[in-house]
Each structure stands twice: as C-alpha cells, then as structure tokens.
Image (spheres, rainbow, N blue to C red):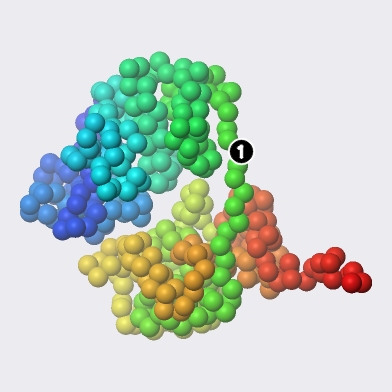
C-alpha cells in the first residue's frame, strides 16, 4: 500500500535552532551516510553540542532541503510551524517593557496526533503535486493554525460554518491583511478539496477583496548610484544580474554556471515561480563583469556560492543591498525585489512592449504586468494636467 511506503521511508525532521546567536534550521535524523552526504551538498554544518546538522534559516534553504532530499527521505517540517512557548510569558499577559509585536497573541497549543497526521497527508499531497517549498510551508502553516483554533475538533469535523467563523476572527480580531486571509482560503480549500476530497465544504467560503498596491521602483539614476556604491565584484555582479534580468531573489540564488548563455546574451531561469522555466536578458555590461567574477571566484555548481560551498545566502544578498542603499544615499523604501520592479518599469519607459516584459518576468497573466503602467513616471509625465490649460 502507498501509505506503508511512506512510513518506511527515511525521515529528516526540521526544527528551528539558535546556533551561536544565529537563526538556523536543524536537520535531525538517525545516523545515515546517504542523508549526511545530502546535508553536506546543501551547505549543512555539524553541531557537536546540538548533535545535528544545520543550515541557514530561510526560504532558500527550505527550497534546497526539499529538493535535495526528494526521493531519498521524507522531510517533516511540522516543528518549524509550531513556535515554542516563551518561558517569560505570564498568563497570556504582555511582559513589562516588551514590544507588543514580540508577544504572541495567543499561547501555542501542542498539535494532537490527528492534526499532525492530517498535516503530513497534506504535505505529501503538496509534494506530489510539485508545489514549491515556500508554498508548502505557507499552506501547512495556515492549515495548522485553523486546526489549532478548533483544537477540540478532529480536522475532518471542521465544518463550513467553522471556517467562516475563523475567517471572521482573523479579519476582525487579528486584523490580518487581505493577502494573509487569501492564503488561509487557498490553504483550507486545498486541504478539504484536494486532500480530503470534500470540495462542497469549501465551495462557498468567501475570498477577501484583493488589495491593489503599487510596487516600489527606483529611478535609473538611483539604480546606477546603487550599483556604483558596491565595491566587491561578487556583490556587484549579484545586484547587476538581478536588475539586468529582472530576477526574483530565489531565482538568482538557484542559478548554476551553465544557466548563463553568453553567446545569446541570455540567462536561463529554471523552475521559477509556478515551476516555470524561462529566459531573460543579459546586458553586455553584466557579461563583462561575470567573466571577471568567474575567473576570480571559480564557483563549482551554483553561479554564486557561499564561502563554504553550496547555495549563497538570501540574507547575505539582502545585507549587501541594504549597505549599498545606505552608501548611495537612497532614502526611498526599497528591497532587493525593487530591482525586479525597476527592471520592468524601465523597460516599459524605454518603449518595450508589455507582452515581452510579461514573458521576461514570467507572469502568467498580462494583468500582473500591467501594474507597471501605473508607476511609470515618464508616461505620466507626458500627460498635461487640465489646470495648466486654464487662463488664470
């Protein structure tokens, strides 16, 4: 039976770990040479005190873990979705002097065996469907919170009216964002429709109205100042490549040396958002920089690797970006992802057709790409205000 095979498979348990003041992910499993070898390929380090292998805590590491152990071991990430209750909490009241945002709203409730089993079935189904590690993590977390909220009920006994009550609680008391509510709907729909096979239970649950927020964008002058502020060759190549090709951070970190196609001035993005492959642009300037970088650093597999080998850290890229932002004197709110938004906006302002921009970004819908028409300052600047036509 299929269930029996899953039980017999080797298991790698993931847990949150504080190692020398750094947030890490612990990989716990019985002594096994194959699992140890896999841990090393993703940059795992052995902790003698904790008696476990560990990697950096982040979505990129999660993606690497699930990809590396796929077919070799069952990855159980339940412990990552259950935060340990603070030893300083007193009867649910806020600790004197502690910021409200640091104090959990409700105490954590240990998962029951039925809830853990349901989440494991959901995780297995999501992995079979080849959902991304980040989506799997988000869906499991949202579904776990629903189960905990109705801890007195078996997960399969939570009815439509219960789900609606939970949505109202999240919206009115927790006051979560529309995007968070939407994640709850997606996750709960998936569990009851695709795992439990009861589509009717979630057929009519309400989905929140979508928020429409404009992306933050840097001007071409600001991008130039940002890149000039980076002296390190490797760091400069990282930021230049994100802007040159409009990459997501996870896509950049997953690039391998062979994904750079210099003769066609293209970069191959494999397994992007939604599991889609695509190609994007490489400027002559980044190709020159990359040639110098490859000669100086000689990475073995990934285009950008950590000092110890393996995939480069997302946190490191974000730190590089923040330092460059500060050094360049740019005060506008921006993140690494702002470079991708800026890439699309600048292409649009320079006359590139939206359909091509959609392809380069890997958007499924043209409506997603059309948002850049709302932040294009050059296009808006050509429109004359009616006030200027008045004879005052």
**Which residue is farthest right?**
391
Q: Nearer the viewer, residue 376 or 326?
A: 326
Q: Nearer the viewer, residue 303 or 322?
A: 322
Q: Is residue 176 visible?
A: yes
Residue 151 pos. (x, y %): 33, 21
Residue 141 pos. (x, y %): 37, 37
Look at 84% across and 67% down and name the residue there.
Answer: 387
**Which residue is farthest left?**
49
Question: Which of the 4 image quarters holds residue 15?
Answer: top left
Q: Secondary structure at mark 1?
A: loop
Residue 33 pos. (x, y %): 14, 49
Look at 35% across and 17% down and name the residue there.
Answer: 153
Residue 247 pos. (x, y %): 50, 63
Asked whether, in this view, residue 239 is left or right of residue 2, the answer is right
Asked whether, in this view, residue 52 is left or right of residue 172, the answer is left
Callout 1: 10 Å neighbours few (<14), some, many (20+)?
A: few
Quarter of the figure that contains the N terminus: top left
């Amino acid at each position: 039976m299929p269930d029996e095979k899953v039980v017999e498979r080797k298991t790698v348990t993931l847990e949150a770990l504080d190692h020398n003041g750094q947030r890490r992910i612990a990989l716990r499993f019985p002594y096994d040479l194959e699992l140890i070898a896999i841990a090393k390929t993703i940059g795992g380090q052995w902790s003698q005190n904790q008696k476990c292998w560990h990697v950096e805590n982040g979505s990129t590491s999660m993606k690497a873990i699930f990809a590396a152990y796929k077919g070799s071991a069952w990855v159980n990430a339940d412990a990552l979705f259950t935060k340990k209750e603070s030893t300083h909490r007193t009867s649910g009241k806020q600790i004197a002097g502690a910021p409200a945002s640091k104090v959990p709203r409700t105490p954590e409730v240990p998962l029951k065996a039925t809830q853990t089993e349901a989440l494991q079935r959901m995780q297995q189904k999501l992995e079979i469907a080849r959902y991304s590690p980040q989506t799997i993590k988000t869906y499991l977390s949202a579904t776990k919170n629903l189960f905990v909220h109705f801890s007195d009920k078996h997960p399969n006994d939570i009815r439509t009216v219960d789900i609606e009550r939970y949505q109202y609680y999240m919206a009115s008391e927790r006051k979560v964002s529309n995007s968070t509510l939407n994640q709850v709907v997606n996750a709960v729909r998936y569990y009851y429709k695709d795992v439990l096979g009861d589509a009717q239970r979630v057929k009519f649950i309400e989905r929140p109205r979508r928020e429409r927020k404009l992306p933050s964008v840097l001007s071409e002058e600001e991008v130039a100042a940002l890149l000039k502020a980076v002296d390190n060759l490797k760091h400069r190549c990282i930021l230049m490549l994100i802007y040159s090709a409009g990459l997501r951070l996870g896509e950049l970190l997953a690039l391998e040396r062979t994904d750079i196609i210099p003769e066609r001035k293209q970069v191959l993005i494999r397994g992007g958002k939604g599991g889609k492959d695509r190609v994007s642009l490489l400027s002559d300037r980044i190709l020159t920089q990359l040639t110098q970088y490859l000669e100086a650093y000689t990475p073995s597999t990934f285009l950008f690797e950590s000092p110890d080998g393996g995939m480069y850290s997302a946190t490191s890229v974000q730190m590089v970006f923040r330092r460059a932002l500060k050094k360049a004197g740019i005060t506008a709110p921006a993140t690494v992802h702002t470079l991708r938004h800026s890439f699309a906006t600048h292409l649009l302002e320079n006359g590139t057709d939206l359909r091509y921009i959609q392809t380069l970004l890997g958007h499924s819908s043209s409506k997603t790409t059309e948002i850049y028409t709302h932040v294009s300052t050059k296009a808006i600047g050509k429109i004359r205000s009616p006030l200027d036509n008045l004879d005052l």
